[in-house]
Amino acid sequence: MALDWDQLEKIQPTVLKMVKNSLLKNRVAHAYLLEGMRGTGKREIGLLTAKALLCLSPDSGYKPCESCVNCRRINSGNHPDVHVVEPDGLSIKKHQIKELQEEFSKKGVESSRKVYMVVHADKMSASASNSLLKFLEEPNSETVAFLLTEQFQQILPTILSRCQILSFKPLHPKALLQQLEENGVDAQNARILAYLTNDLNEAITLNGDDWFAQAQKIVLKLYEVLKKNPLEAMVTLQGDWYQHFKEKEQIDCGLDLLLLIFKDLLYIQLDKSEQIVYLKYREQLEQFALKVSARHLADQMAAILDAKRRLSANMNPQALMEQLVLKLQEGSLFV
Amino acid sequence: MKFLIQRDRLVQSVQDVMKAVSTRTTIPILTGIKIVASEDGVTLTGSDSDVSIESFIPKEEAGDEIVEVKQTGAIVLQAKFFSEIVKKLPTDTVEIEVLNSLQTVIRSGKSEFNLNGLDAEEYPHLPQIEESNQFSIPTDLLKAMIRQTVFAVSASETRPILTGVNWKVERNELTCIATDSHRLALRKAMVEIENNDIYNVVIPGKSLNELSKIMDDSNELIHIVITENQILFKAKHLLFFSRLLEGNYPDTSRLIPNESKTDIILNTKEFLQAIDRASLLAREGRNNVVKFATINDGIVEVSSNTPEVGKVIEEIQSQSIEGEELKISFSAKYMMDALKALEGTDIKISFTGAMRPFLITPLHDDSILQLILPVRTY
């Protein structure tokens, strides 16, 4: 369900204020780069702005009415002058940008105003980026581009310099926590979910998912094994982890869960135990926290973050986890 | 919406509009055919957003009832299934009814199909036609004009504007120009126009090819309306919309030389065949270049030399050669394309030096010309 202007304004007030002003003053840029974490409403606000640009009777000059043909067709993805390019597989290929260029060498189907949106712009292949660059350099006055990305450092600097950048703030975990609790998610899960994602709907889906409940157990088990008998950690990986965490996103989620454990331990040591997320395991964690040094915890967290980075660089998952587990083992230095 | 319709007319119309429907489209609604039932008849529309074809089936024609509209309305049905269904229906009449919530029932004889439709409101809106701003041209002339120009459009997307044909209307005259920056084709014709509007638009070559496929050869008038974003061709019961290209077409008028240093008159067919033979060997080389030289007594020599294959020399008797002697090279492919597009048994080729573009025109006819840039070899 698409959120309307007022709902999105609560999530991203600064961004929408900028959009509103440029709409009202008729100073819409030819290209915007919407940059922010997953679930911060980039796509929604991109489409919202597209609707505002094409709406037949915008409310007070900038709010799309959501009821005219243009708004309805943008919501259902049927507007002939709004084009959305999404990664085809792992990356956005050159031919996709070429098709976009062909499309934009022609006049609009209905009006002269045309909008295109590149989702995950960081996933454009190098040649696709360069073709797009050519296109951004010579904008038609009536064309508006939205590039969406979660990692704007990976966008070519030459593209960045041609876009107006709208930075989306990550949602505050506390606000999301509150919303989740209002939606009947129990306190333990709500805390974890609030740190894992920024998207309320995604969090609620995860909460109802058996996979997620199981994932928490496996991650905790892995940690316990690591603590008690590091030599068995490899066995646990083989037995539970690989069967449960198969896809890249799933492994990423598993690593996030693991990271949260170490974060909790650190909070306990810093005497900020009201911030811990694994409420159910508080006593156990407090026990563990007594036995490690903060320095060591920091090293381990760094190892997990490093693993996450390697994951996004397509490292073999099995090799990745084994390496991580070896790094996390304390005391016995085999490696 | 509810109506009864003659099956053969429906099949014919569906086939016409299916030509515009593309299977690979990013916009989900364009996989469908829009069906509108009004008091006057039924309209079908298919589109791939570049071209749109609208076919109208009137309520009655020559006293025969074709459509019986019981309730007006509109629906979009999946083109893939709808076209197959209507082709295979058992009896001569088809009943199409839209129940509430976009459920569509197609009945014919004892067979009944239930199809899930899409909301017709979501379909792209085609421009409204204003009857006053149109001009007319016979269909066969239009097809000839397309054939004589569209082959010269650029195939590369580096300059998108050159993938289209430039149409200019000024003082009752329509001029079509196509160029890929190595050759140029130009064709002029008189049109019937009511007011003295001036148009200058660029139509994608692909759309014109589609158009000439769908129009039948007759000398009936076809009406043309140019709107801000689209051009519309209106035949009897068929509307063909095409999107225009964005941007300004380069000014080509100064490319065409006014004077010439060497004029040669040749028989079209003989010359075409000679070039074709010469290019047999040239084709093997990278650029398909043939050499052309004047020698004494009105004889022209066409030759080509590909060292690894061999060489060919052919002499052609021209009807007349006026002016300076000349040696020039050009692409055999471009020359053959141009000669095939020209009408008339004899042609005049006007050269202004070996490094300047040359003109090919039919003798005693200035409505069509072909311009080719030579290749530097000597």
Image: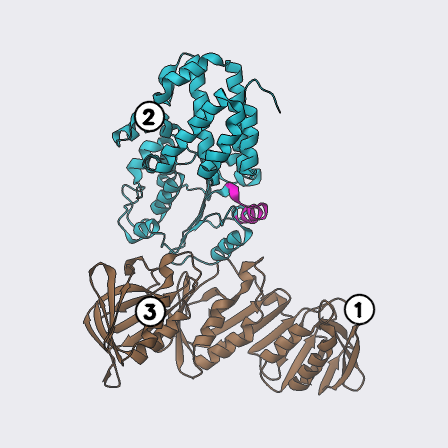
Chain colours: A cyan, B brown
Check disc 1: other Cα within 10 Å, few if <14, some if 14-19, many if 20+: few
Q: What's the amino acid at mark 3?
A: Phe
Residue A86, position as x, y percentages in the image: 46, 48
**What's the residue at 35%, 31% (across, down)?**
A13
Q: Is residue B289 left or right of residue B126?
A: right
| Residue linked to disc 2 | A188
Disc assigned to residue B378: 1
Give the vertical position of B258 relative to A311 (above or below): below
Residue A281, position as x, y percentages in the image: 37, 21
**Which residue range is magenta in the image?**
A122-135
For disc 2, the chain is A
| Residue linked to disc 3 | B82
Q: Nearer the viewer, mark 3 or mark 1?
A: 3
Numbered disc 2: secondary structure: helix
Q: What's the amino acid at mark 2?
A: Gln
**What's the residue at 47%, 77% (across, down)?**
B142
For disc 1, the chain is B
